[in-house]
Amino acid sequence: MKVYYGLDEFNKGEKIVATIGTFDGVHIGHEKLLKNLVAHGKSCQAESLLLTFFPHPRMVLFPESNDLKLLNSQDEKIELLSNLGIDHLIIEPFTREFSRLTSTEFVRDVLINTIGIHRLVIGYDHHFGRNREGSFRSLSELSSLYNFELEEIGAKVLDDINISSTKIRKALTDGNIDIANEYLSYNFQISGTVIEGNKLGRTIGFPTANIKPIDKYKLIPGLGVYAVRVTVNKTILFGMLNVGNRPTVENTENTTIEVHIFDFNDDIYEQQISIEFVKRIRDEKKFENTAELQGQLDLDEINCRAIFD
């Protein structure tokens, strides 16, 4: 998959099947659409292309009232999309000026004159252009005018629920990691740098790596204890992770991410590690003392190891 950081880097194709959207999460609904796109491209000897945007449009259009957190960092999204067989990925910087393009200008100037689409595949209830004025109906009219094919892919439904990035964000915020992972079709993950902590964990037999997420826009799951898979220097390890405010020892207002890696004692300060959230074990709790905390951590480890065993 070739990656272009802007429309100006892309040379107009001879036969392109394309789709557009933010595709945050690259969830099972997105996979359904993108697999259709790739399959159609192969069947008609065309190249597949995805046009996406960064920053997320809501971050640009509503900067003061927007607290949107994303399911994927840009690097994570690129890796997930590369596994789906797409030929071209254009990441267009989203600006207020770009947002002012009308639906007709977007189709004419971007899709036709810049990309050169042969066929456009869009998701269910897709809107685009200034004030989201463009819809499937307007695209149908424009497809006749500019001579391109058009297809709408229905929403992916699971347990009578339409899958969406918004619903996955809600599940993660609520700590419903099982639901989020099912909708994503992979384990939600966070990459971060190991930083100095207060080292309390090692005094009670549970040394932890304190994680500072690399991407400031990355969503952090709800408070609680999770069984996690940890990648350190390309080695996959297992552990338990706490997202919380340290109510027993500090009760800080800042959310911390601390992972205890099983059977691991290496110094990894300042290193980057990746964490996959496998299962939520319990809510965060406040304990009367460190002895009570240690007893709970012993139980947490037993429960987490049982999941991986």
Image (cartoon, rainbow, N blue to C red):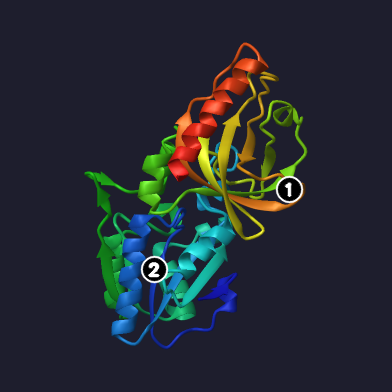
Residue 266, label in figure: 1
Q: Is residue 200 left or right of residue 231?
A: right
Q: Is residue 292 above or below residue 95?
A: above
The image position of residue 66, as x and y in percent, is 55, 39
> Residue sitting at 49 percent across and 84 percent down?
12
Residue 106, label in figure: none
Callout 2 amino acid: Thr
Q: Is residue 270 above or below residue 174?
A: below
Classify mark 2: residues with Cα within 10 Å, few (<14), some (14-19) or many (20+).
Answer: many
Q: Nearer the viewer, residue 163 or 223?
A: 223
Q: Is residue 261 above or below residue 92?
A: above
> Residue sitting at 56 percent across and 27 percent down?
298
Provide the secondary structure element on which disc 1 rests: loop
- Figure quadrant of the C terminus: top left
Q: Is residue 233 left or right of residue 164?
A: right
Classify mark 1: residues with Cα within 10 Å, few (<14), some (14-19) or many (20+).
Answer: few
